[in-house]
């Protein structure tokens, strides 16, 4: 999913799959499944030192056990619109649309963060945890409401326009980015799905999302 995300223009750091046996210093008692692990390059560490990052649970003052309850995508969008630039707004919409299309029903407050590259101004941090969850846990709703609804089958261009209005985002930018993301997703899915390490269940689940999410067809 992260490779697919990069294909639609989402900011994804370097990633790879490695053999678990190659990982040193795993904590004693760590639960290990399978033979491979997903690794991602840290974006909060530079040669000049650490870079401050805070996830949206921290931003909203929410403890991890309430990461599904205390905010919506609209409220997150409002923060990004107030603190970031147009590029951050577009990136947020890209991610919202992408995760709906892959069937990620677990996009909670800790799955997105702001980063402060110059220690003063906030920007949307790179993506780090996008998973198609519906092949494993059947769910027709997102973890957080989009604007008025959390139901995938109610995610329309109208819902995004409502989100833009309430979060005070430029509607034209929001809808244009959504349409571009849908078009790129269909292009990348057609080109890459057979080459990515996806089970039949995952492929079937994504195909199902492309049928039930109105945005998948309306935006085209």
Image: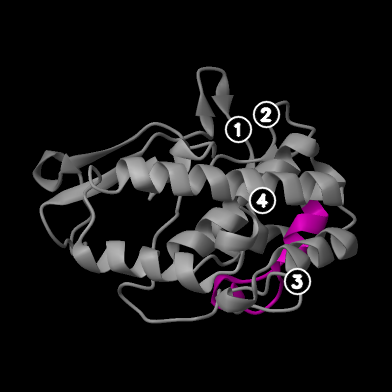
Which element is circle 1 on? loop
Residue at mark 1 to residue at mark 4: CA–CA distance: 30 Å
- Circle 3 Cα neighbour tier, 10 Å, few/some/many (<14 / 14–19 / ≥20): many
Quadrant of res 206:
bottom left
**Mark 1 or mark 4, earlier in chain:** 1
Residue under circle 2? 117
Which element is circle 4 on? helix
| x and y, in percent, of residue 72 in the image | 71, 70
| x and y, in percent, of residue 114 in the image | 67, 45
Quadrant of res 156:
bottom right
Residue at mark 2 to residue at mark 1: CA–CA distance: 6 Å
Residue under circle 4? 178
**Mark 2 or mark 4, earlier in chain:** 2
Q: Nearer the viewer, mark 1 or mark 4?
A: 4
- Circle 2 Cα neighbour tier, 10 Å, few/some/many (<14 / 14–19 / ≥20): some
Quadrant of res 176:
top right
């Amino acid at each position: 999913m992260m490779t697919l995300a990069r294909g639609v223009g989402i900011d994804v750091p370097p990633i790879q799959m490695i053999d678990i046996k190659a990982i040193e210093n795993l904590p004693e008692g760590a639960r290990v499944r399978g033979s491979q692990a997903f690794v991602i390059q840290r974006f909060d560490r530079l040669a000049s030192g650490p870079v401050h990052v805070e996830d949206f649970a921290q931003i909203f003052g929410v403890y991890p056990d309430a990461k599904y309850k205390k905010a919506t995508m609209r409220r997150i969008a409002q923060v990004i619109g107030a603190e970031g630039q147009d590029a951050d707004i577009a990136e947020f919409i890209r991610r919202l649309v992408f995760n709906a299309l892959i069937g990620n029903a677990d996009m909670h407050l800790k799955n997105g963060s702001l980063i402060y590259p110059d220690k003063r101004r906030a920007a949307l941090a790179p993506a780090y945890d996008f998973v198609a969850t519906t092949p494993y846990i059947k769910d027709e709703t997102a973890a957080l409401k989009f604007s008025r609804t959390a139901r995938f089958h109610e995610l329309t261009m109208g819902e995004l326009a409502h989100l833009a209005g309430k979060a005070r985002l430029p509607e034209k930018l929001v809808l244009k980015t959504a349409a571009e993301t849908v078009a790129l997703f269909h292009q990348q899915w057609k080109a890459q799905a057979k080459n990515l390490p996806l089970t039949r269940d995952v492929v079937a689940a994504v195909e199902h999302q492309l049928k039930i999410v109105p945005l998948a067809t309306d935006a085209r």
